Amino acid sequence: MKNEKKNLIGHLADWINWKRFLFSVVLIFFLTSIIFPFYWMVSSSFKTKAEIGGREPVYVPSGLRLDAYRELFDPNHPSYQDFGRNIVNTLKVSIPTAIIAVILAVLGSYAIARFRFKGKNILLNGILLVYLFPGVLLIIPLFAMLAQIGDQLGFNVQDNLGVLVFTYMSQTLPVALYMLTNYFRTIPDEIEQAALIDGCSRLEVIWRVTLPLSIPALISVGIYTFMIAWNEFLYALIFLNDRHMFTMPIKINTIFNDPTPRPNVVMAASTIMTVPIIILFLSLEKYLAEGLTAGGVKG
Amino acid sequence: MSIAGTKKVKSRKTQEARLAWTLISPTALIVFGLVIFPAIFSVWVSFHDVGLDNLNDVFHAPFIGFDNYKKVIDDYAFKFQGLQNWGAAVTTIIYSFASTSLAVLVGLAASLLLNRPFKGRGVARAIFLFPYVAPIVSIAFVWRWILDPRPSGVVNDILMSLNLIELPKAYLASRGLSLIIVILLDAWRYFPFCMLMILARLQAIDGTLYEAAKVDGANVVQQFFFITIPELRYVLGATFLLRLMWTFNKFDDIFLYTGGGFGTKVLPVLTYEFSFRLYDFGRGAATAMILLLILALFMTLYVTVVMKNVED
């Protein structure tokens, strides 16, 4: 009798171990396949030309060599890339995109969430169009339209970071509107009604009641739109021709397609582009992970 | 008294409507100007001969009927020419379905993994999201560097030292293999989205269902197929549809991995090539409209057939 019981527990232990073993194997497989590319990116950025071009891959660089970073930032380097300028350009595009998108989306989504008005459904369906329409389709009419407008108003459509910010609204504003409308709907109407009865105007209610309650949502929407603009490739590829105006993604593409391949430089530039995004994401993961699904961020 | 009251309510209502429009008008203008109008305008462009020369005077571009569509359909890059050369239309469909299915399956596995409590689960979840959050440009070039065709490429080095391959392979520059690799890379990049969607639903499943199943003697596999999967049906369907839609429209990934070469040319890349390499915007718009039509067809089929079954 006793023996049987022990056997049963023994079986159970085996079963749990087998399960745990499988679980750990799968988990480790996932983690390595995710982490390795990032490790390879960062480690390759510290490799020398010899380490990059050798007959066998170098798994661990001999030291933290800054050769690749020097090419990006040191004006005395023979093939100096002036990457600092590209970082500034990217910031010049992504910060205004985020700020404008958040401000417009706050106003718009408050109206959508709280008021009934004519044309609301057309607007909402129009917003959904972006989710269905390929970006590569919208860029053709946008390009034609902007060329026309630019011609008449006398500004350049190409190499104009302001135009780029404007076109990014087509990608960021719908996402921002969608996320914020969902959020505003979760704020109970009673709180606002109470403030209205106390004699506040609608705008005062928005400013004093709704916005303070929405700070986490505003931050996540701001970061999202910032990330969309920071990562954006296609529109920047089409609108930017002058290397002084390039944003980081276009610059990295250019370095990669250089006739003399220098993967360590490409990896250094990629590292610079990726690390801030990962840090931003990790510091706000709690808010962002929810928004990723709630907003269905297009990607 | 009551009349004054309704008047007050009414004026309040019109005031609110006016405020609503004030608040929404900048957004409405931008959504109209940057989304709705361009969407309609691109249909117009697809029926006209629009090139770089008449771009500044686009509204007077000559109407050419279905010529752009005919040109696209007859293009060797578009049409199916046998198994050696699938053409962009078939490639797009296969690429989208394969990479979406794979991303959903891997996402399901990852969400089941993270649904179990274990030490460091929060950290693991954050790391699992890295592929989706990191910029596509960095991701694409890291993978291209990892899959470098020279013997010094990491994957080549590992596979050769394990004796799995004899000669180094050009993973992103061989017909057939490239499409498979791009599908795998896309699943790698987009599974975290599916994982998040599924995980949220998974955590909402009533635990007593499993308790009851255990009492009835169901094993883990049976629990998975008779409780977990039915509970997840709706979210799996919705996630698949969303990802399919986005993958269909995706330009960046394939453009950066292969430039659309070696049998990986999909319709968004072809649209880009017609529009911004040949500067034939009409033909580009026609390609995009065909893409949209195929997508709309699949979505209607999917929603009416698959999702309806799911709801039943």
Image (tube, coloured by chain):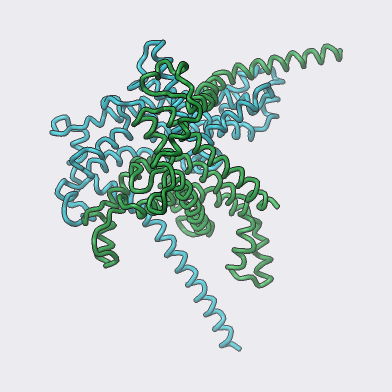
Chain colours: A cyan, B green
Is B82 placed above or below A237 here?
below
Judging depth in this view, the residue of A58 and B252 nearest the camera is: B252
Q: Position of residue B232 (x, y in %)?
A: 61, 54
Q: Quadrant of residue A68?
A: top left
In the image: residue A70, left or right of residue A238? left
Q: Nearer the viewer, residue B61 or A171?
A: B61
Q: Is residue A78 visible?
A: yes
Q: Which residue is at 28% across, 33% downward?
A: A251
Image mark count: 0
Q: Residue A102 in the image: state x and y as whole percent.
A: 50, 26
In this view of the protein, can residue A280 be seen by the observer? Answer: no
Q: Is residue B98 left or right of residue A155?
A: right
Give me the residue at 41% from left, 27% from top.
B281
**Front residue of this view, candidates B175 and B124:** B175
User: Residue B278 appears at what percent x and percent y?
Assistant: 35, 30
- Left/right placement of residue B85 relative to residue A113 reads left
Q: Is residue B280 above or below residue B269?
A: above
Q: Is residue A167 above or below residue B294?
A: above
Query: Residue B152 at x, y = what percent?
Result: 21, 55
Q: What's the residue at 71%, 15% (across, down)?
A: B14
Q: Quadrant of the N terminus of chain A?
A: bottom right
In the depicted view, which residue is nearer to us: A283 or B192?
Answer: B192
Q: Is residue A169 above or below residue A292?
A: above
